[in-house]
Image: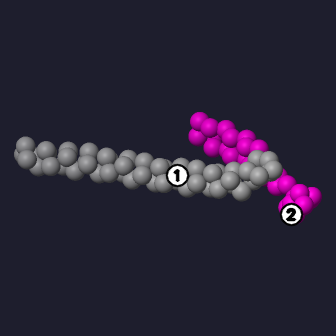
Amino acid sequence: MDWATATVSLLLGQGSALLGLWLRLSWRIQHEYAQRRYLAASVEAVAHGGRLQIDEHGSDGRRLRMELTCSQARTKEGKA
């Protein structure tokens, strides 16, 4: 193997590994953004008198448990 062939194969190998890592990171970021948007929408939905309880474990055990409790709808008189 001459010098040019070795250099090209080394660059292609490292480049494809770097591309794979970049794609995984990009997917992970999109997943985290979607999860954050969902949580923000849920909190906004129960902001008026509701209750949101979140049980989240991290370190890639990845457990997210949510309990949403909405209050009853109020009438114009303020009664449920």
Furthest-front residue in this view: 77
State the quadrant of the C terminus: bottom right
Foreground pick, 67 / 51: 51
User: The magenta stretch spans which residues?
Assistant: 53-80
- Percent of width and height locating residue 50: 80, 51
- The residue type indicated by label 1 comes to Tyr
User: Can residue 78 be spotted in the picture?
Assistant: yes
User: Can residue 24 be spotted in the picture?
Assistant: no
At 63% from the left edge and 51% from the top edge, which residue is drawn? 40
- Percent of width and height locating residue 1: 10, 46
Query: Mark 1–mark 2 contact, CB under 8 Å?
Result: no
How packed is label 2: few (under 14 Cα within 10 Å), some, or many (20 or more)?
few
Furthest-bottom residue in this view: 75
Q: Secondary structure at mark 1?
A: helix
- The residue type indicated by label 2 comes to Lys
- The residue that label 2 is drawn on is 76
How many discs appear? 2
Is 50 colored magenta in this rendering? no
The label number, if any, that marks residue 33 in the structure image: 1
Is 70 colored magenta in this rendering? yes
At 81% from the left edge and 50% from the top edge, which residue is drawn? 49
Which of label 1 and label 2 is nearer to you? Answer: 2
At 77% from the left edge and 44% from the top edge, which residue is drawn? 53
Q: Quadrant of residue 79?
A: bottom right
Which color scheme is applied? one colour
Q: Quadrant of residue 63?
A: top right
At 39% from the left edge and 53% from the top edge, which residue is drawn? 23
- Percent of width and height locating residue 39: 64, 51
